[in-house]
Amino acid sequence: QQQVKQSPQSLIVQKGGISIINCAYENTAFDYFPWYQQFPGKGPALLIAIRPDVSEKKEGRFTISFNKSAKQFSLHIMDSQPGDSATYFCAARGNNNDMRFGAGTRLTVKP
Amino acid sequence: DAGVTQSPTHLIKTRGQQVTLRCSPKSGHDTVSWYQQALGQGPQFIFQYYEEEERQRGNFPDRFSGHQFPNYSSELNVNALLLGDSALYLCASSFSGANVLTFGAGSRLTVL
């Protein structure tokens, strides 16, 4: 069922560095691509999202880059902070209105 | 404003038993989706309820069933529990199937 492939599985970044997480999808019918952030013991929370007719979206330190022809999208976290340490999931909305999630990336930002 | 609330937060069952999980959506939301999140994995879509009917369903067996009540709250029922059903069950609400999902903290089910 999982049609979104996410990498890396885990990522360690120094404070102030750039965190980059990548996702690839197969189904061209996907029409909405969100990123979710999940802290231990909590449910996922929407971080930022993009539609396929846009190549980039930026909100504060978080940027999504979207490459429709390559069927890939990525999350960039600029000036990474220890408080950003969490698990990040990319997702894609299918034509049945269901959200397909990647397997997740555990980000650790070292002080 | 309360977000999505789920109960119970943790429960332990044995193989073959049945379980019911409950979800109250965020105020103003009318659509409820259920997801299963195995340890170290991303959430997997189980089904979505709107106007008290199952609107969409993922690749889950009929042992998984649900219900939505007139106040938009929802239940997830799992019959004949298997060890592999051990997971975090997440409820997410939205408004009329809009893109933005608001997740609850989940119900962690352990099947022994």
Image (tube, coloured by chain):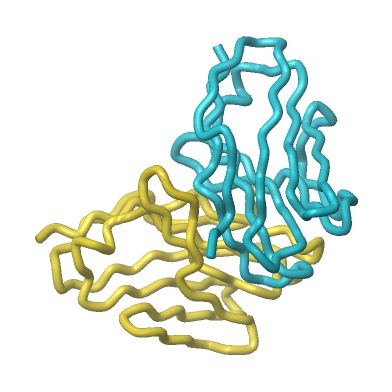
Chain colours: A yellow, B cyan
Compared with A81, B37 (above or below) is above
Is residue B24 visible in the rendered image? The answer is yes
**Please, is residue B44 above or below residue A98 in the view?**
above
Q: Position of residue A110 (x, y in %)?
A: 14, 58
Q: Quadrant of residue B59?
A: top right
Q: Is residue A82 above or below residue B78?
A: below
Q: Nearer the viewer, residue B109 or A8?
A: B109
For residue A36, side relative to residue A54 (left or right): left
Q: Position of residue B97 (x, y in %)?
A: 76, 67
Residue B79 figure quarter: top right
Quadrant into which the C terminus of chain A falls: bottom left
Residue at 32% from the left image edge and 50% from the top image edge: A10
- Residue A48: give x, y in percent of width and height: 48, 75
Residue that appears at 63% across and 48% down: B91
Question: Which residue is rendered at x = 74% and y = 27% of the image?
Answer: B78
| Left/right of residue A55 with respect to residue B55 in the rendered view | left
- The outermost residue toward the left is A111
- Residue A1 appears in the picture as rendered: no
What residue is rendered at 55% in x and 69% in y? A34
Number of numbered discs overlaid on the protein picture: 0
- Image location (x, y in percent) of residue B19: 69, 23
